[in-house]
Amino acid sequence: MACRCCMRLALLALLGVAVVSANTFLEKAPEPVPDPFDQVALLDRFEEALGSGQRQATEARLKDITEALAHTFATLPKNERGAVGTAGARYAIHRLFVQRHGWQVQGVAPEGETWSSSSPVAALGEGVPGHVQDLLDKRFGSHGLDLHELAVLAATLENMIHAEAIQSLEATYKVYGESTEGMLDEASTERIVDSYMQAYVLGHNMSELTRQMVDRTYSRMDRILPLWQQTREFLRDVQREVAPGLSAFSFADVTRIVEAVSERYGQHQDSVECEDIQQKLLQLEEVGGTGRVKLHDFYASVRKHRFWQFREHPEFLKQAGVLDDSDPSSPRVIIPNYFNMPSNCFNPPTALYAICCIDKCEALIDHVESEIQAPHATPERIVRVVSALPSASVPANRTLHQELVARLERVAQQHDGVVPLHGRLFSQWMHFAYPRECPYPHAAGTTKLMSSEEWSQATGMKVSLMLADLERYVEQLHPVTEPTDWWQQQHGQHQVPPQHACDEETGTCMAMWQDVEELVDAGHWDITRKAKQQAEGASSVGTVMLRALMLLAFVASSVMAIGGFVQQAHESFSAALTSESACMKPALSKSMNCFV
């Protein structure tokens, strides 16, 4: 009886621990702290600054932008309110516009510095009054931004860019003497859209142009921009999709066309001009698939293949973070870094953004985020995800090189066994995992991203080398040049050249690896990790208690079973003794048999 009571107590205790463990698990993801700042209040602030039309346009875009931000937001470290910091918000908005439109929004792109170097509110520029920006900066700095607020800020930026496009369209109407209240036939609509686009791609402010200037540009555009006919085909495709079947166009109809063109032109440019750059670089890529082109081959291609674009001064390339000079015998151009240079962007007549080649690593990172759905992961988890993830140049279900896996494990050692997804070291690892798609992330402050014009003004040198200078560099960089000789020519006689960089067998160039971490949002990362460690600690205590009580239950059950066995044995033994005593009585018959 006592054993049965013991067993029941053990089972009750076991159930109690199960309830405690469940509660502890739920405590790992606490509900966000209620925020007294009403979500609608943010839209009210922008309506106050930009007008009711801006609010309506923002609300119309919110659902789409919220969905587009969801993956990145879910994997960024957050505070106790479930909000990201200003550095994380800047990072998320930058990636959103790069992926959606190929836009590098001023004040959001890092430009060689850390993500925490400025607030994303700065991207609003003069479009929002200073007192509103100060209010938002103060509020976001102390509370952070939840997903809704992040989407509102991104949608507001996108609408401000569209508002500039509409202003340019109005100026185009004015140049042609057309009223925005009237209707246009199809030919007139195409002429206005073409002229708008010509000013857009050439960086001209339409409000400063005359009809004569516009007509002259229109007649010479094929010579000014060799790919203009492809651009016109793009414009007609957008027109047919946005305004199908129309023979007369209102200003609202043309506005829809121009807005769609503005949103999609980055994708179009990427598929035509940027793809051309990419293919040329891959044609010159060194053996091994390292994602690098020897600088000698880069310059020699101007004469050999008539790749006229590849004439940038080596100092310009180095300052832009494009050169890998870790191998003294052969400095290399890093393909994705060259591809993403600011000098490959063009600036529409706006101070808000530039249109650049779309970073091909963004889609890969987005996939990793959608799989992990957390700010960090173990090396084993990341290896499984990346091994299965193909790119344009890497097959799916590959086996990652042992050295690459070891580097990821080394990153995890710096962060208590996990790898932050939004830090320099993981970005660096992704570069070596996808050397043709993912750019090498230089440490903050070691590069300076400048346009060609800015660099020329700062240095007094021309970005493009003359043919004579190109020939001189080709000769200096000839493969037969001794490594030490070339290095000392460039860096001085007393400089010690570094070791060779690339393993041609594995296609890895790990000499550029630097164990320098720079988290997108270090402060919120610390909050996230401490919360997880506390939850894991509570879970560990619950697990230990559960195991102890399970052992207690097992012991109690065993004791009960043994007690039952002893009792049965005692009863059997007593019955046997009783039977034997009966057989030994004198009065029993002689023929009686007794069996025990």
Image (spheres, helix red, strand yellow):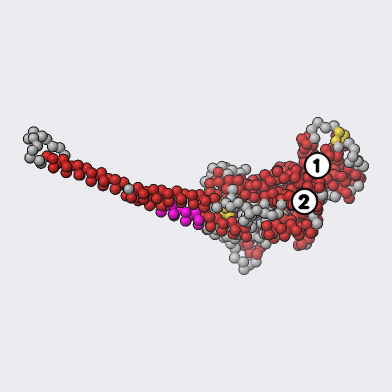
Label 1 neighbourhood size at 10 Å, few (<14), some (14-19), many (20+)?
A: many
x then y, percent, for residue 459: 76, 62
Label 2 neighbourhood size at 10 Å, few (<14), some (14-19), many (20+)?
A: some
Does residue 166 appear in this view? yes
Q: Residue at x 70, y 43 (%)?
A: 64
Task: Answer left or right for 168 relative to 344.
Answer: right
Main SS of residues in magenta: helix
Q: Residue at x 63, y 47 (%)?
A: 71
The residue at which mark 2 appears reads as: 44
Q: Give the magenta-colored segment's residue range.
A: 537-548
Residue 564 marker:
none
Disc 2 is placed on an element classified as: helix
Q: Nearer the viewer, residue 504 or 131?
A: 131
Does residue 356 appear in this view? no
Residue 258 marker:
1
Q: Residue at x 39, y 50 (%)?
A: 9
x then y, percent, for residue 258: 80, 42
